[in-house]
């Protein structure tokens, strides 16, 4: 199985020109947090099956539309909608290219992360180093008032992101790279505007910092290409015998192969997960040689999804990490891409994965060993202190 064969990511939802981004937690033009229907967190009576005839229906609808001179993409979207599969989605050729670039750890934008405050204002929460926004002197805490003359107060962050990224400037990210965007900004009582040029930027999918007591905190925002090796390198560089906090909060998934590589940092081979594709059972295994003695705490929350849940489940089931936080999202289905006649791509559900002990994640999530919310990091440090005393 190649690194691009197996994806576990939240569905992108169409809303005019505004798209809910594949990795809602990192891909802002900068980054935006995504919100999901709370009903998806409820435990179903049984694991949802792949819709019968789902793939054949989509393929037939697309082929018929093509023969009739109509849009295969629109026909496929209707077939996906009728299937009731909330994770399948259809992308235009340009959108899927954007998706693949996201998996490669890249996005087009100006380097701003933002959130909407309770009063509707859009506030800059992060400025990526080396980005056009950083070069313009924009800072965390600045207010974003407008994009190309359009007032953004009260808008969903995803719409603001779409404006910043230039989603309407062309069919692909390349069309938006180098285009100008005028931002209206406010800092205190000062208001001003900046004209920036969009650029191709790299996401910071893995960040590492040192906590008290030589604890190493590894934050994985998403499993983009190369993130697994970054985790392994961070573990190898951590002080001997010191604990690891693996922060998976808000991680909405990505490349499953990268999650398996990350698991290999903490396991000496063995099972990471099982999954089925059209009913055929398969297994994912860690590489041998991981660190099996260092104490590890995994931090999770309701935004921990998909490939991040796969990693969490593997470490929890195999007794390799204490899981602290709140119950995870519960997205355990597997999607694979299928190219349609017009070049668009259908990402269709082909099966579901289970943790090493056979636990089904889809619709259920993973229950942490220790419940914690705002104080989760403090609880993690306490747990590591105790594990260090007994090791």
Image (cartoon, rainbow, N blue to C red):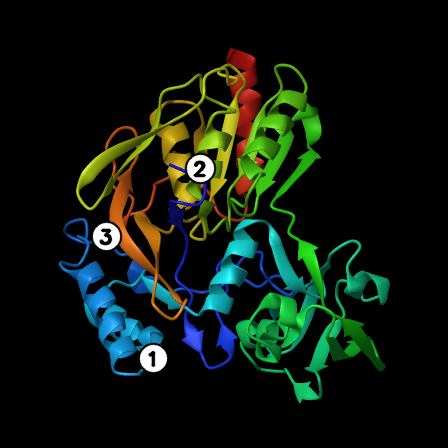
Using residue 62 as the reference point, say whether residue 127 is left or right of it. right
Query: Looking at the rendered structure, which numbered label has been put on residue 257?
Result: 2
Q: Residue at x 55, y 74 (%)?
A: 171
Please identify the quarter of the rendering in which residue 37 is found: bottom left
Q: Residue at x 54, y 46 (%)?
A: 224
Mark 3: which secondary structure? loop
Tell me where residue 203 appears, x and y as whole percent.
64, 51
Please identify the quarter of the rendering in which residue 36 is found: bottom left
- Above or below, 212 against 207 in this view is above
Residues under labels 2 and 3: Cα distance?
27 Å
Dot 2 surroundings within 10 Å: few (below 14), some, or many (20 or more)? many
Residues under labels 2 and 1: Cα distance?
33 Å
Q: Along the line of sight, which residue is nearer the eye, 137 or 280?
A: 280
Using residue 202 as the reference point, say whether residue 60 is left or right of it. left
Query: Looking at the rendered structure, which numbered label has been put on residue 71?
Result: 1
Q: Along the line of sight, which residue is nearer the eye, 8 or 43?
A: 8
User: Are circles 2 and 1 on residues that touch, CB within 8 Å?
Assistant: no
User: Are circles 1 and 3 on residues that touch, CB within 8 Å?
Assistant: no
Mark 1: which secondary structure? loop
């Amino acid at each position: 199985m190649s690194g691009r064969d197996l994806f576990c990511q939240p569905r992108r939802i169409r809303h005019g020109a505004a798209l809910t981004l594949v990795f809602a937690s990192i891909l802002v033009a900068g980054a935006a947090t995504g919100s999901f229907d709370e009903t998806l967190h409820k435990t179903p009576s049984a694991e949802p099956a792949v819709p019968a005839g789902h793939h054949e229906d989509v393929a037939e609808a697309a082929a018929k539309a093509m023969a009739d001179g109509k849009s295969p993409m629109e026909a496929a979207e209707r077939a996906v909608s009728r299937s009731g599969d909330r994770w399948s989605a259809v992308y235009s050729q340009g959108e899927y290219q954007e998706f693949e670039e996201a998996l490669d750890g890249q996005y087009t934008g100006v380097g701003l992360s933002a959130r909407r405050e309770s009063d509707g204002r859009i506030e800059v929460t992060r400025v990526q180093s080396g980005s056009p926004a950083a070069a313009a002197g924009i800072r965390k805490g600045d207010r974003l008032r407008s994009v190309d003359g359009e007032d953004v107060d009260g808008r969903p962050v995803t719409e603001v992101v779409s404006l910043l990224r230039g989603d309407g400037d062309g069919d692909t990210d390349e069309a938006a790279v180098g285009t100008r965007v005028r931002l209206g900004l406010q800092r205190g009582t000062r208001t001003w505007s900046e004209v920036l040029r969009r650029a191709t930027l790299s996401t910071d999918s893995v960040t590492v910092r040192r906590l008290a007591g030589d604890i190493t905190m590894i934050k994985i925002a998403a499993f983009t290409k190369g993130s697994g090796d970054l985790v392994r390198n961070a573990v190898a560089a951590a002080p001997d015998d010191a604990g690891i906090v693996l922060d998976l909060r808000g991680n909405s998934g990505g490349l499953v192969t990268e999650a398996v590589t990350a698991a290999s940092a903490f396991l000496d081979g063995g099972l990471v997960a099982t999954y089925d594709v059209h009913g055929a059972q398969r297994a994912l295994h860690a590489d041998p040689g991981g660190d099996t003695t260092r104490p590890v705490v995994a931090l999770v929350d309701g935004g921990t999804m998909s490939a991040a849940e796969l990693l969490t489940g593997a470490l929890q089931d195999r007794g390799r990490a204490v899981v602290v936080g709140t119950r995870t999202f519960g997205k355990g289905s597997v999607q694979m891409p299928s190219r349609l006649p017009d070049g668009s791509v259908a990402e269709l559900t082909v099966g579901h994965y289970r943790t090493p002990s056979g636990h089904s994640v889809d619709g259920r999530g993973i229950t942490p060993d220790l419940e914690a919310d705002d104080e989760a990091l403090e609880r993690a440090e306490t747990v590591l202190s105790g594990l260090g005393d007994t090791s």
